[in-house]
Amino acid sequence: MVANPRSFGRIAATNALSDIYAMGGKPLYALNIVCFPLDLNKQILQEILAGGAEKCVEAGATLAGGHSIYDDGIKYGLAVTGIADTNRFLRNNTPRIGDKLILTKPLGVGVVTSAYRDGEANYADITEVIASMERLNKYAAEKIEPYDISACTDITGFGFIGHILEMTSGDVSAEIYCDNLPHLNRVKYFIEDEYITGGGKRNRAFVGDRVDTSGLPMWISELMYDPQTSGGLLLAVKQEQADELLGKIKIDDPQATMVGEIKIRTNYEMTFV
């Protein structure tokens, strides 16, 4: 996804740490998990590990060691352990009717990185993507502690729609404010230029007829199916507290927006306005 090994390490670590934040927890320590080719320059591995270590320090987590094996390709991640108050533990499928939905990072990572690999996206495009992927969800997570959050998840490989459906798996649906969806600057251009990822196509096939996006602009529809790497938090917060919480999150995560609300289940698990 990125050519710079240190950035690769930062993104992988940020992605791994995100699961702890999404559950209302704080990371305590992490273990490196590494697969690395025998004949590749070990300086690359050193840079990957350094990038991961930087994000652990930023998160306040101790990097306690790890495990490594030789493999044909490079693989790197963290096994992270955190702690959460059992009275404040956040689940991904327990939103309340009337709650507002806040998304803390922009969408479009898969599309823009695909365009960059093909030489279509420029340096500014990939710099924007990398900055988003390297951004810890720590800062948004710290701000939600005093608020009444009923559900939370982080947006990753299943795309925005996939993770919304995970959240509304009970007797509720989500109404999505399409015009509010945060997105990377040139993602509309790339989607309309037919940069649709394989992961996005698989997400659409998996969702099937559970969601009807036929009335939406094509680029909005594909944006919601696009798989994300190290995406933002999706929060379901009490309606009366939503504007205040969003304002606080936007201090450090300015692209955070109100993207919808939880409704009584109708014919579809998701509707769009």
Image (cartoon, helix red, strand yellow):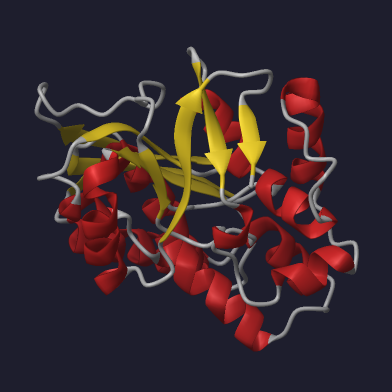
Residue 261 is left or right of residue 40, and the answer is left
Q: Is residue 163 above or below residue 65?
A: above
Q: Residue at x 37, y 72 (%)?
A: 254
Percent across and percent down for residue 205 are 82, 29
Q: Residue at x 54, y 77 (%)?
A: 128
In-front residue for pair 192/85: 192
In-front residue for pair 257/156: 257
The answer to whether one can see residue 117 in this image is no
Residue 245 appears in which quarter of the rendering? bottom left
Residue 176 is left or right of residue 172, and the answer is right
Residue 75 is left or right of residue 100, and the answer is right
Percent across and percent down for residue 95 are 37, 26
Exactly how many numbered labels are in the figure? 0
Percent across and percent down for residue 259 are 49, 51
In-front residue for pair 149/31: 149
Q: Residue at x 90, y 69 (%)?
A: 193
Percent across and percent down for residue 136 are 33, 59
Q: Quadrant of the N terminus?
A: bottom right
In-front residue for pair 139/176: 176
Residue 94 appears in which quarter of the rendering? top left
Q: Is residue 193 above or below residue 219?
A: below
Residue 223 is left or right of residue 204, and the answer is left
The answer to whether one can see residue 246 in this image is yes
Q: Is residue 220 above or below residue 70?
A: below
